[in-house]
Image: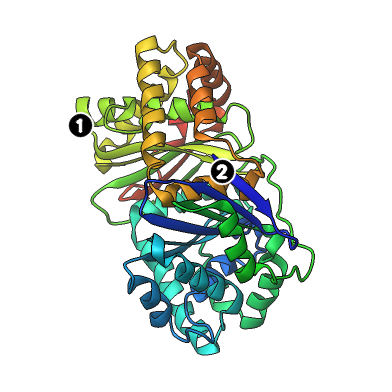
């Protein structure tokens, strides 16, 4: 169970008491990510997150910030996604005040020193280069462009080398003023703690933080037609492919049904894709599927790395497994998928970091937190008929997209394979 308090400045504080733990985890979620950026701002959310670890007046260097937490055995990190940014810290319980002090310091008092900006600009460009050099990451970027053409959701969260090179300090500070606001922020804490004590402590650290201006919104996504196939020819040993379809949003009532369908399709070594494509046909070493839920969109994606000569055979085999999802699913397979989903969820909830993330991610995006018990009940109630109906609705051949990175001829007839 969690408790929630909203401060006068709009900051939301949510706690979950876990009496038998030795760690405390704090997450600070901000409702901003790459989809809030214009074309010229592409990558600015990610750039800002990097710079918040580079120095404050109190802790002038990146080493002092990281060393403060690592010196007590803790973990400090951050992350930027399409729709949220998170800063988090996990420490032994006795070091909670220190962890909160460091997080509040980097959030409110980062210097954005021009020298740090230039150094980190190069670091991020190297991060982009690294992603482009990794075929699995590169094909993931290409499929996003096919799923969300001409939209911020289809861009790399890190931006491009050109956009990152053009971001200025003033652009960052203006962006901060419009997005890093207390009423756009959620602080979640999990561990052997008491709610009211946490509210008091967080209030002292962040209660005077003020909303400078109205928050900037994001560009809504509307389904549009575009390319269905993109091939990037590279001299690689494998052909890396992503086969994808539009999915369901974070707020869609059938999102958990789709998650369960995905467990059956491609999560784990006993999934249909792994069993058929790897174990039975030996076509791939790595194959899996995953679901993405966004505020107004979503996707279902299958990734595999295969021998280029086996590419068409592998695609046909994967499409066959997608088609089979429209057929009746046995009670035994349904039961196994449910127990797998519930088991993984319950195991994650033993960790304070995951509990804090569970609460904060839901609150910042939906302003509503489903408990673990509620999600378990939703999963238990899903029927085989509901899975079949959703498969019929979503698995439509005309909606298929395919991205490939590898040693593939550009004239290979791949688009004609995209049918269900």
In the picture as drawn, the residue positioned furthest to the right comes out as: 214
The residue positioned 71% from the left and 48% from the top of the image is 220
Going from N to C along the chain, the mark reached first, 1 or 2, is: 2
Q: Crowdedness of circle 2 by 10 Å Cα count: few (<14), some, many (20+)?
A: some
Task: Give the numbered dot on residue 73.
Answer: none
Q: Quadrant of the N terminus?
A: top right
Rendered position, 140 above or below 89: above
Residue 38 in which image quadrant: bottom right
Rendered position, 128 above or below 2: below
Q: Position of residue 354 (x, y in %)?
A: 43, 48
Q: Secondary structure at mark 2?
A: strand
Q: Secondary structure at mark 1?
A: loop
Q: Nearer the viewer, mark 1 or mark 2?
A: 2
Rendered position, 248 above or below 53: above
The answer to whether residue 395 shows anywhere in this view is no
Spatial separation of the CA atoms under disc 1 and disc 2: 47 Å
Q: Residue 313 or 62: which is nearer the viewer?
A: 62
The answer to whether residue 129 shows anywhere in this view is yes
Which residue is disc 2 drawn over?
2
In the picture as drawn, the residue positioned furthest to the bottom comes out as: 115
Q: Position of residue 54 (x, y in %)?
A: 47, 79
The residue positioned 76% from the left and 71% from the top of the image is 212
The residue positioned 54% from the left and 77% from the top of the image is 165
Q: Are marks 1 and 2 in contact (CB under 8 Å)?
A: no
Q: Position of residue 68 (x, y in %)?
A: 39, 76
Which residue is disc 1 drawn over?
282
């Amino acid at each position: 169970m969690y408790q929630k308090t909203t401060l006068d400045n709009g900051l939301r504080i949510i706690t979950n008491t876990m009496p038998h733990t030795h760690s405390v985890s704090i997450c600070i979620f901000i409702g901003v990510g790459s989809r809030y950026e214009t074309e010229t701002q592409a990558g600015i959310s990610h750039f800002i997150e990097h710079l918040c670890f580079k120095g404050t007046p109190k802790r002038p260097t990146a080493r002092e910030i990281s060393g403060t937490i690592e010196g007590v055995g803790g973990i400090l990190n951050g992350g930027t996604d399409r729709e949220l940014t998170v800063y988090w810290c996990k420490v032994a319980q006795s070091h909670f005040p220190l962890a909160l002090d460091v997080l509040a310091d980097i959030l409110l008092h980062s210097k954005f020193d021009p020298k740090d900006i230039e150094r980190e600009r190069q670091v991020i460009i190297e991060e982009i280069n690294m992603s482009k050099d990794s075929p699995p990451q590169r094909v993931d970027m290409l499929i996003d462009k096919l799923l969300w053409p001409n939209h911020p959701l289809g861009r790399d969260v890190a931006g491009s080398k050109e956009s990152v090179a053009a971001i200025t300090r003033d652009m960052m500070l203006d962006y901060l003023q419009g997005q890093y606001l207390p009423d756009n922020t959620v602080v979640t804490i999990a561990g052997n703690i008491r709610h009211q004590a946490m509210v008091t402590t967080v209030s002292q650290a962040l209660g005077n933080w003020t909303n400078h201006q109205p928050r900037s919104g994001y560009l809504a996504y509307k389904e549009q037609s575009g390319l269905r196939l993109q091939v990037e020819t590279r001299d690689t040993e494998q052909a890396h492919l992503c086969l994808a379809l539009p999915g369901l949003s974070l707020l869609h009532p059938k999102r958990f049904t789709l998650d369960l369908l995905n467990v059956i399709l491609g999560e784990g070594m006993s999934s249909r894709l792994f069993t058929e494509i790897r174990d039975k046909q030996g076509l791939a070493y790595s194959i899996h599927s995953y679901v993405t839920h966004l505020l107004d969109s979503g996707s279902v994606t299958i990734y595999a790395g295969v021998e280029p000569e086996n590419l068409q055979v592998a695609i046909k085999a994967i499409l066959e497994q997608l088609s089979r999802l429209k057929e009746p699913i046995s009670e035994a397979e349904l039961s196994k998928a449910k127990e797998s989903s519930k088991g993984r969820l319950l195991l994650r909830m033993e960790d304070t970091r995951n509990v804090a993330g569970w609460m904060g991610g839901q609150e910042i995006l939906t302003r509503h937190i489903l408990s673990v018990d509620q999600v378990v009940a939703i999963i238990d109630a899903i029927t085989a008929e509901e899975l079949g109906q959703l498969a019929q609705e979503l698995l439509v051949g005309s909606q298929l997209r395919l991205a490939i990175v590898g040693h593939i001829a550009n004239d290979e007839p791949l688009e004609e394979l995209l049918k269900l």
